[in-house]
Amino acid sequence: MSTETETPNVDRGIVERLRASPFLSQLLSNRLAVIGIALIGGVALVAVYARLAYDLNAIISTQFSANPTEAAPSAQYWFGTDGQARDIFPRVLYGAWYAMLYGTVTVAASTVLGVGLGIIAAYYGDLTDNVIMRTMDVLLSFPSLLLALALVTIFPDSLGLWRAVAALTLVYTPRFARVVRGAALKVLEDEYIEATRALGATDPRLLVRHVLPNCLAPITVQSTLNFGLAIIDIAALSFLGFGASPGEPTWGMMLSNGVEYGLFSGAWWWSFFPGLFLALTVLGFNLLGDGMRDALDPRMREAID
């Protein structure tokens, strides 16, 4: 009896706390942000389903003698087939797994590097700040895609898409470093930082326990926006032939094959469906990033209150 009566109270408490959260309530009141969450959630479910339901070796293989070549979309082949008689539907779905996996690693690695460099530059200042930030300025002076193309050639071809991830990690790191440095400088001006230092807090403890938590808002927004950029840049590198190996079901590689071969033969579906999924995924992250930025903006909260 006690269990049955206590569980609803716990559930109501969780719901009430979620509704009372200023950030969450503001985010969920933004319809575009909700659409972004729905798109990202849908792509994530597709990625997990493709990873569990399909065999990658079978998707890459060209031994599909039973399938017609360049068949248009139909009830049997929802997205049609390509010039090697491969069903495009499972390839597009598996491309979602590649996009989410490599996009997550790229954003996570660049976030860790950028946040670490930005906080160190802000905290120690002087020579350390100048060396770190001037290096970041040099990296930011190049167009991101051109810099990624230059960096990706450093890594061996055997790494496949991982070399694109490594190159884009270096490209995105300066963005996080500059954002975090600016936020950390504001936090370090607060009096409680001096009080904490006077109480004997070590530098690592001060940075991790006090400075970093107060910089999470811009880090979160920057990570969300960069996630969409990472997915589209990985696709761009694959499109240009720097990244995925031939036959791998990445959206960029499928777009490249579709533009190079499909459009000349009138097989528009080669590039349409991977392009559609790519566009929806990037749109979802952009909408969510904009919504999070608005929800975390103190000026907007004051206007609402």
Image (tube, rainbow, N blue to C red):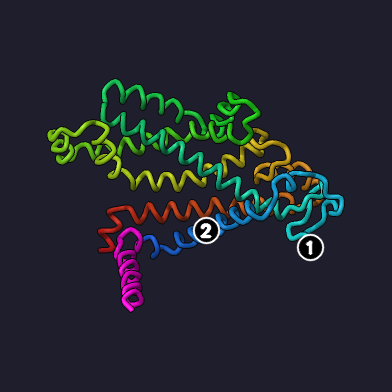
Q: Amino acid at mark 1?
A: Gln
Q: In this rendering, does residue 113 appear at all?
A: yes
Label number found at residue 41: 2
Decide whether the magenta segment is chiefly helix, strand or loop. Answer: helix
On screen, residue 241 versus residue 103, left or right, reads right
Q: Which quadrant of the figure has residue 214? A: top left
On screen, residue 84 versus residue 138, left or right, reads right
Please give the name of the residue rendered at 19% of the width and 37% of the height, measured from the top-left corner: 189
Secondary structure at badge 2 equals helix
Q: Which residues are magenta?
A: 1-26
Does label 1 or label 2 sit earlier along the sequence? 2
Label number found at residue 76: 1
Task: Estimate the x, y position of residue 16 in percent, counting from the top left.
Answer: 31, 68
Against 11, residue 159 (above or below) is above
Q: Residue furthest bottom?
A: 1
Task: Estimate the x, y position of residue 288 in percent, counting from the top left.
Answer: 45, 55
On screen, residue 182 versus residue 36, left or right, reads left
On screen, residue 238 versus residue 73, left or right, reads left
210 falls in the magenta region: no
Please give the name of the residue rendered at 30% of the width and 37% of the height, measured from the top-left corner: 182
Task: Estimate the x, y position of residue 61 in percent, counting from the top left.
Answer: 77, 44
Secondary structure at badge 1 equals loop
Q: Amino acid at mark 2?
A: Gly
Image quadrant containing the C terminus: bottom left
Q: How many C-alpha atoms fall within 10 Å of the one at disc 1: few (<14), some, or many (≥20)?
A: few
2 falls in the magenta region: yes
Q: Nearer the viewer, residue 105 or 270?
A: 105
Distance between the alpha carbons at the discs numbered 1 and 2: 27 Å
Q: How many C-alpha atoms fall within 10 Å of the one at disc 2: few (<14), some, or many (≥20)?
A: some
